[in-house]
Amino acid sequence: MSKRILALLLALVLIVGVFAACGNDSGNSSSGSSSTTSSTGGDDASTPEGGEESSESTPTSTGADPTDEFYDFTCYWYYDWAGIKDWGADAASKYWGEKFNVNIEFSKPDADPDSKLNLMLTGGGLPDSMILDRGRVLNSVVRANALVEIEQFMYPGCSFETDVAKIAKDLQRVDGKLYGVPNWPRGEGAVATGGNYQWIINTATYEEVGSPKLETMDDLHDYAVKVKEAGLSSYSGMSVIPFGCTNTNNGYYVYWPFYRSMGARNLVENYFTQEDGKLQICVREPMFVEALKTANKWYNEGLFTSEVFTDDGDMWLEKLTNARPALIWYDFSQDDTNNFRRIVREKTDGKTSYEVLGDPNSELTKDMPIWPKASEDVGIIYGDENGTVGWNVNVITTAAARPQRIFDVFTYMISEEGSREQLYGPEGGLWEGTDENGIPKLTKPYSDITSAEMDAAGAWLWTQPASSDWIDSIKFAVNAQQPEDQRNWVVSLQSDLCSESKENPHTGTKFITDQNTGLTNLIDPQDDLGIKLKAIQDELQVRLPQIIMAKDEEELEKLVQEAVSTCEANNIDDILAIWQEQYDKNIEMQGFDAYDPEYINKVYGLS
């Protein structure tokens, strides 16, 4: 196992290389003014990400911003679920604050993020920086002339040039310009690594109902039914929930696993399918409607309740840490931030745990399939798409007095040095020195580090923005250094189960593709078609939970048809035609369709 992890590490190190981090140069700065140019949103406002206007500009900065002058800047999270932390309260952010002589004040909306953002853009006062979704949200802010483009802050030797692949930069451009430091980007030639959502079982509950086989979706259903009929209580005395998933106001985390169990391709922008390489609105895709019917069946059988649509993050975490869910669809990597599994194990002296299906390191689940299939007719169950662009972006607004300093901070966070500190805090705490490959040497075994020590170090608290390549290569290597029985549960799962593996290829791993990138940049959200797209998204956010909770199949079909009618009344076919053109261009640009049998068979080691 350690050889496998080390092989992946070496591959990543060779691919990414070792580069100097932005912010180490104390040369002259080109910052200091809030009048830095932003997009005009003029005649080329429809230019897509990666379009013809995507040539990189020549860096104009002469170096990082001098840090002799203290700078206090604000950063606004677009998301109402964001966990706001205090800068400087832990070792990592305290160290960065001193290194760059900054303080960052974070904020988020209490509710309705779009309304709050619109208020800011129309005179409500811009923060200095923001964390935004790519696509519709980023486009709106760019075209409101609220952001500065960031390539002007690059300078010779700046690691941002090399830590983020060229295609990743090009694919996230808006109107030909680059506005965001991406979160979880990849460098040139990267392989797919990491992992998040998987099927998880509560070990105590599983054993209480006789440890049934879990090989198909029918088996998962029967297990949940047994749990319901048994009327079990968790260690905390609270009732056990047969099935639970991440709180999901639009139903995504309910319908997603049911849909993919049918051998479906990954969903695009939550509500779109891509079967046979053709984009479609989900409610017109027959296989997706079948997934909704399966979810509806589980709901009407009482295997989960409407709380999955109404809980907030804290409510869901409370259920998890009280060991209430028996079968779970969840991001297992959250254990490195919210400690959901560690808390349960600590509270029960290890008598109750959570285990991921197919985990090669779990005696209980290692022989179970990673992705139980809906039927014997299903072929491949695909793992997650792993793009080079990453997820969301950190942007700098026209209100910032020292945009170069903000750029320096954000790009340092995706450098090799910054990544080490995101993972384990600054040197001198949880680690001391590095090996010949730049891998930090922990001061004690990882398994001996308590959650309190992790929090004090700031470990995993500040991974926004973060680098997929650096984070994964470093943490995989550190984990491989540990004794086999003391390795980190999350990291072992990501390296051994979820990451693309050349030595041990297997179905269900992640795979690289950017074919779905930039679709939402094609339609201006302020134009008529952009307004209609938002109306479609709003409709499905409300309608899909209603469909899942329909009292019978007749009502379900009626609600589906109402959703289809709303989509069609809002020109869904015009939207699909525009998106499809860019989708096809992306495939041509990257040189392959990730769902082509030749490509996916190579990733999964199939004949």
Image: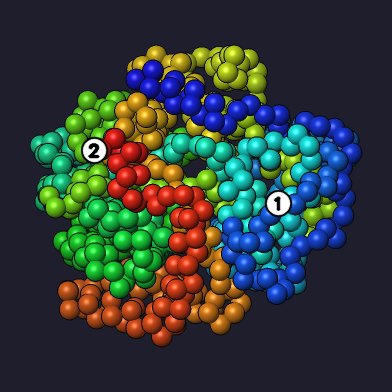
Q: Which residue corresponds to the image point at 78% horizontal and 37% vertical from the top-left?
A: 156
Front position in the image: 383 or 32: 383
Say which element carries label 2: loop
Seen in the picture, residue 40 relative to 192 is either above or below; the reply is: below
Question: Can you give x and y, in whole percent of width and height, for residue 114 in the image?
Answer: 58, 69
Question: Can you give x and y, in whole percent of width and height, for residue 397 in the image?
Answer: 74, 58
> Residue 339 occupies which quadrant of the picture?
top left
Q: Which residue corresponds to the image point at 58% horizontal and 48% vertical from the top-left?
A: 168
Circles 1, 2 touching at the beta carbon (< 8 Å):
no
Front position in the image: 513 or 590: 590
Residue type, label 1:
Glu
Residue 607 circle label: 2
Please indicate, yes or no, whether residue 589 appears anywhere in the rendered image. yes
Q: Which residue corresponds to the image point at 87% horizontal and 55% vertical from the top-left?
A: 33
The quadrant the C terminus occupies is: top left
Residue type, label 2:
Ser
Please indicate, yes or no, whether residue 343 appears anywhere in the rendered image. no
Q: Which residue is mark 1?
A: 56
> Residue 188 occupies which quadrant of the picture?
top right
Question: Can you give x and y, in whole percent of width and height, for residue 326 in the image?
Answer: 24, 44
Question: Can you give x and y, in whole percent of width and height, for residue 246 in the image?
Answer: 37, 52
Front position in the image: 95 or 382: 382
Relative horizontal placement of residue 394, taking residue 294 as reference (left or right): right
Q: CA distance from mark 1 to mark 2?
A: 40 Å
Seen in the picture, residue 27 relative to 294 is either above or below; the reply is: above
Relative horizontal placement of residue 303, taking residue 577 as reference (left or right): left
Q: Residues within 10 Å of mark 2 (few under 14, many from 20)?
A: few
Say which element carries label 1: loop
